[in-house]
Image (cartoon, grey):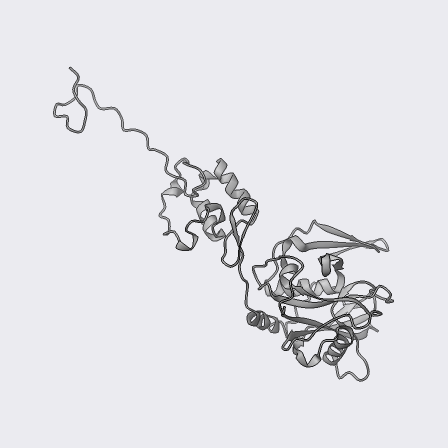
Amino acid sequence: MPKSYGSRARIAPRHPPPPPPRARPRPCLLALAPVCSPSPLSARPRPAPSLRNAGTPSACRPREWARGAATRAHSCIAQKGGRRRARARRGGLHCAGGEVRSNAAGCPRRYARGVSAASARAQLEGLIGDRTIFDRWPERTAGGERPAAVLVLFGVLDGHPADRDAQARAVSRDLDVLLLARAATLSTHAGQVAFPGGRLEPADRGPVDAALREANEETGLDPEGVEVLGMLPELPMPYSRHIVTPVLGWWASQSPVRAVDAAESAAVFRTPVAELLDPDNRYTSVLRRGGRTMRGPAWLVGPESRHVLWGFTAGILDAVFDRLGWAEDWDRTRELDLEG
C-alpha cells in the first residue's frame, strides 16, 4: 500500500521525495503583462506606490517612475506589454500634473502647468547682461550698419483664446509674446513676421526710446504700460545692413494692439509662448538664395497659422528659449521651403 507523502505522513517513504517545483514567474513590475520571467533586478525593493497615480494606467504614470520601472524589469520590455509601454512613452503618454486630457489610447494625458508669470518675468530679466546668449549668431559685417531696435515684449494673455490648444512643460499657457506681420509692400523684409521696431531717429535717446516709439506707431500699444527689463546684445542684420538692439520688455499694464498703418503692418498678434515651444509647431526654414542654402528655426503663427516666423526674429526667440531652458526637443528634419 503506498505511503502518504502529505504534510501529516508519519512513515518514511521508500523513495526520496520529488524535487521542489520550479519557481513560478513573478508578476511584472510594469503591470503591462500578466507575468514575466524572473530577473535579478526584479528582486530589488520597490518604493511604495504614490497615491497621486492611484487608478491611473501604468502606461500613463510619470516618466521618472516609468524609467525606473523599466530598468528594474527590463526583461519585460520584449513582451507585448513592454512594446505597448515603449510606444506610449514615445508618444508622450505621461502624467506630470496639471490639466488632464484624453488621447487616442483612452489614457488621461496630463501636462505640467509651467512656471508662473512672475517666475517667467524673473527668468527673462536674468538674461540682461548675458553677453553669450547669441554666440551662435553670424559674425558682424565690416561696418556701416545703421542702428535699429526691436521690442521683444512678453506678457500674460488677457483671456483672448489661442489659435492652438498647445501645451508646454516650461511655461504657463497664458504667457505670450507680441509679434506683427510686415506689409507686403515694404521695400525690405516684406511680409515677414517680426518684433515691433525700426531705425533710431535723431530724437531718440537710445535703443529703448526707438523700440517703444516704433511699437507705438506700429501696434498702438501704450509705452507707459511697458516695463523695460533691459537690452540684449546687439545683433547684425546683414541683408538690410542694420545693427539691431533687442529691448526686452514686460507688459506691466496692457493696452489694445492692432495694425495701425496698413502700409507698415498687415497684422498684429500676441502669440502664446506655449505654441512656440510645442514641438509639433516647430520647423526648420530652408532658404536658397544666390547658390547658398540657409537653414534656421521657424514656426507657423498668427490667425489660422497663415504667417511664417523665420529669420532674424525666429533666431532671437530660439536663442532665448534655449538659454532659459524652455525649449523642448523637436524634429529638425521638418522643413519649410521659403522663396528666395
Quadrant where the N terminus is found in the figure: top left
Horizontally, residue 162 falls left or right of residue 99, namely: right
Task: Say whether residue 78 is visible.
Answer: no
Quadrant where the C terminus is found in the figure: bottom right
Q: Nearer the viewer, residue 59 or 68?
A: 59
Q: Name the spot of residue 221 as percent of width and height, x first.
A: 72, 76
Name the residue rendered at 36%, 46% in the picture: 44
Horizontally, residue 224 falls left or right of residue 145, namely: left
Q: Is residue 85 above or below residue 259?
A: above
Name the residue rendered at 77%, 83% in the picture: 204
**Residue 236's image quarter?**
bottom right
**Residue 238's image quarter?**
bottom right
Q: Name the spot of residue 280 as percent of width and height, x first.
A: 65, 53
Q: Name the spot of residue 201 as percent of width and height, x first.
A: 81, 80
Q: Is residue 119 above or below residue 96?
A: below
Q: Nearer the viewer, residue 284 or 194?
A: 194
Q: Name the spot of residue 168 as percent of width and height, x first.
A: 59, 59
Task: Say whether residue 10 is visible.
Answer: yes
Q: Nearer the viewer, residue 21 or 257?
A: 257
**Residue 312's image quarter?**
bottom right
Name the residue rendered at 48%, 52% in the picture: 62
Total marks shown come to 0
In the image as oriented, which residue stretches furthest toward the top? 1
Horizontally, residue 65 falls left or right of residue 157, namely: left
